[in-house]
Image (spheres, grey):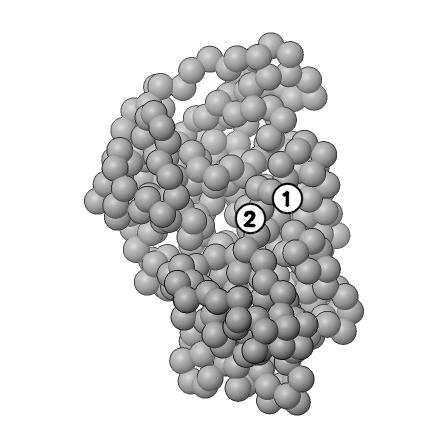
Amino acid sequence: MAYAYCADTPGGVEVLQWRDIETPAPQAGEVVVEQTAVGLNFIDVYMTSGLYPFPESGPQIPGGEAAGRIMAVGEGVTGLAIGDRVAYTTPNGAYREERVMPADRLVKLPDTVSDEVAAAMMLKGMTVEYLVNRSFAVKPGDKVLFHAAAGGVGLIAGQWLNHIGAEVIGTVGSAEKAELAKQAGYHHVINYNEVDFAEAVADITSGSGVDVVYDSVGQSTYQGSLAALKNFGYFISFGQSSGVIENFNTGDLAKNGSLYAQRPTLFNYIASRAQLEEVSSNMLAMIAEGHISVNINQRFDLKDVPTAFEALTTRQTSGATIFTTGR
């Protein structure tokens, strides 16, 4: 038996229960992972709240990225063995000490990447990879606006975009977070609590606007994000930390300059094994070559998920947050 955080009904942290849950033997094509580190992401709160569907049977176990060691291998698994260090990202299910996983959804970790870094990077790092390479292929000289620049995804994005050669503008909510964003490679940082960010972008770009906006905030930034774009620019909405955009209107795309809009998800970009290998390899190479590093600014014991949720939802965190299991 191993422990996991489970929710039987949708709600806030009050529905989460830390309880024993059986780890079954691996079937063909599966392995059992003893988890050492688990990442925290805003989507974990959404999973618990019921914004996304609960499983048809059994509890909801939030958590989308983790790392650990293989402790058992099912029939037919090749390329992985007991003791190998691996990491993964899935829509949910990571807030536990042990887990059965399909072997083809795991990424074998190189010695240069620790379990903690992997747990902080699998979802966030691959999200940045698809955003800047696939949702909109950023080129040297492109002007980019990235919201939540001091968050886990934002700090990785700043480094990655700077390496590409883009002119990177970030938004944050405090002077402390502005300094973190600057250290991560943002050329311009806007404190949205002090100025209108769309007006600030217009000043920075001499009125031309940016080529692409990456927006994980949602409702509170939607209109300003569109206003900050140049004609034919790209609005990439990949999250909704301030709430789901409720007033989306395709007419807004026309009046703001014949814009393009996308609501992507990582799991469409890593649906096949070949896609997972390509995206994860690109991310791991960026780490190995020293182009990006991960700021793990908060660590919690896995039993302290409610405390971590509170810190995240009240915007008291910066960079990446991980849970450790003591394994």
Query: Is disc 2 surrounded by few (<14), some (14 to 19) or many (20+) residues within 10 Å?
Result: some
As helix, strand or loop, the secondary structure at mark 1 comes to: helix
Instruction: Please tell me which residue is depicted at 63% across the width and 26% down the height of the picture.
Output: 104
As helix, strand or loop, the secondary structure at mark 2 comes to: loop
Does any portion of residue 255 appear in the rendered image? yes
User: Horizontal and vertical percent for residue 43?
Assistant: 43, 49
172 or 250, nearer to the observer: 250
Residue 56, placed above or below residue 115: above
Query: Is disc 1 surrounded by few (<14), some (14 to 19) or many (20+) residues within 10 Å?
Result: some
Residue sticking out furthest to the front:
251
Residue at numbered disc 2: 265
168 or 266, nearer to the observer: 266
The amino acid sitting under disc 1 is Tyr
Residue at numbered disc 1: 269
The amino acid sitting under disc 2 is Thr
User: Horizontal and vertical percent for residue 166?
Assistant: 72, 70
Instruction: Please tell me which residue is depicted at 55% across the width and 48% down the height of the picture.
Output: 265
Does any portion of residue 241 appear in the rendered image? no
Check the picture and name the quadrant holding the C terminus: top left
159 or 91, nearer to the observer: 91
Residue sticking out furthest to the left:
14
State the separation of the CA atoms marked 1 and 2.
7 Å
Residue 28, placed above or below residue 145: above
